[in-house]
Image: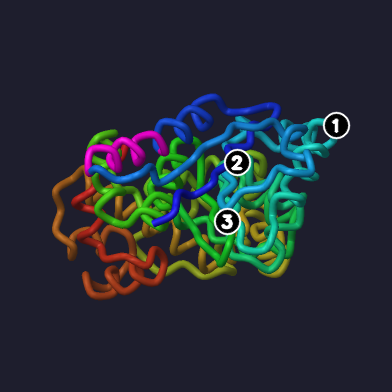
């Protein structure tokens, strides 16, 4: 196969770990190629946004590392800088027909500002996902999966999900076997979902009025809870509660309840050694079948697949 001309775009600010991961993972793929007597899969250039604005700068694959932004204030302040404008201009220029644009973490906000998320399914850092939806409402947000591909756009979640992004790209261009070799050489575990890392409490940290809904649900998680009850716990009408929850978490009340139940089920699965029926009873499902159905609907995966994975 032909070597893929690749640009690693270095933003300002830049998450140094993401930048290093980009180079290290692509070099790992090229080493696998050399071990097998093949030409390299990727030719790699690392460019600043200003360099990428040069007339002759183009590539088949553009990788944008994370920007190391962790809060709404940091994101909003950064989007007002000259450096950010230059970055988004470079992304618009590089997004030529046929070019894959890949970004992770807070770098996805630059993709949004460049218009590359409009009408596309994308993800980002799970706790910044509601902000991404607020700032770029045309994005079709998927905050569940670690890596999301939609046509020529590939996005990934927080921080070290950049590893998953690079493995995804290596598999796309070099094949599954090469990606698996890179995964094993770099000791990178498979992590398809962000849900085991998601904290509802963190999502609600900036909205104390909604925290009462989480507390009420946790105290009553073994039974069915209505939206009216959650709203009443917050001192709101169901309509006001639904609107406020959507703005803060990018979830409907139903998705909010399912997320809390499912993440608690994953925690119990990994830490308590309980059976599926026991876990189902503890998180408010009639039986293991109902839990498995909810797990599949919310995560796209089986319950047992989470038992086999290791998470912090």
- Name the residue that disc number 1 marks: 82
- Name the residue that disc number 3 marks: 100
Q: Position of residue 148 (x, y in %)?
A: 49, 59
State how far apart marks 3 and 1 are (Cα): 25 Å
As drawn, is 36 to the left or to the right of 168?
A: left
Q: Position of residue 16 (x, y in %)?
A: 54, 24
Q: Position of residue 176 (x, y in %)?
A: 29, 56
For the residues bearing labels 3 and 1, Cβ distance under 8 angstroms: no
As drawn, is 189 to the left or to the right of 251?
A: left
Q: Specify start and end residues of the magenta stretch as a single range.
A: 26-36
- Name the residue that disc number 2 marks: 64
What secondary structure is marked by label 2? strand
What is the quadrant of residue 287 in the picture? bottom left
- The mark that comes first in sequence, 3 or 2, is 2
How many marks the image carries: the answer is 3
- Closer to us: 276 or 186: 186
Q: Residue at x 76, y 50 (%)?
A: 93
As drawn, is 60 to the left or to the right of 52?
A: left
Quarter of the image with the N terminus is bottom left
Q: Position of residue 212 (x, y in %)?
A: 57, 49
Q: Residue at x 49, y 36 (%)?
A: 159
């Amino acid at each position: 196969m032909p070597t893929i001309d690749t640009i690693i775009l270095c933003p300002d600010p830049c998450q140094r770990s993401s930048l290093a991961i980009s180079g290290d993972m692509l070099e790992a793929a090229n080493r696998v190629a050399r071990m097998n007597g093949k030409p390299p899969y990727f030719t790699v250039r690392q460019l600043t946004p200003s360099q990428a604005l040069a007339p002759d700068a183009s590539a088949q694959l553009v990788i944008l590392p994370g920007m190391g932004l962790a809060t709404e204030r940091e994101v909003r302040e950064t989007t007002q800088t000259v450096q950010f404008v230059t970055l988004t201009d470079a992304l618009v220029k590089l997004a030529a027909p046929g070019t894959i644009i890949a970004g992770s973490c807070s770098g996805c906000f630059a993709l949004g500002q460049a218009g590359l998320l409009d009408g596309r399914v994308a993800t980002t850092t799970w706790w910044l996902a509601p902000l991404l939806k607020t700032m770029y409402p045309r994005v079709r947000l998927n905050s569940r999966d670690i890596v999301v591909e939609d046509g020529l756009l590939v996005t990934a979640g927080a921080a070290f999900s950049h590893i998953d992004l690079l493995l995804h790209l290596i598999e796309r261009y070099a094949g599954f076997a090469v990606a698996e070799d890179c995964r094993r050489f770099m000791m990178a575990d498979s992590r398809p979902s962000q849900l085991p890392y998601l904290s509802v409490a963190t999502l609600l940290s900036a909205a104390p009025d909604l925290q009462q809904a989480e507390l009420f649900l946790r105290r009553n998680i073994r039974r069915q809870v209505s939206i009216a009850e959650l709203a009443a716990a917050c001192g709101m009408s169901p309509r006001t509660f639904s609107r406020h929850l959507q703005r803060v978490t990018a979830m409907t009340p139903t998705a909010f309840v399912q997320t809390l139940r499912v993440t608690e089920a994953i925690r119990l699965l990994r830490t308590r050694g309980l059976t599926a029926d026991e876990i189902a009873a503890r998180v408010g499902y009639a039986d293991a079948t109902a839990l498995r159905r909810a797990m599949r609907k919310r995560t796209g995966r089986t319950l047992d697949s989470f038992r086999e994975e290791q998470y912090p």
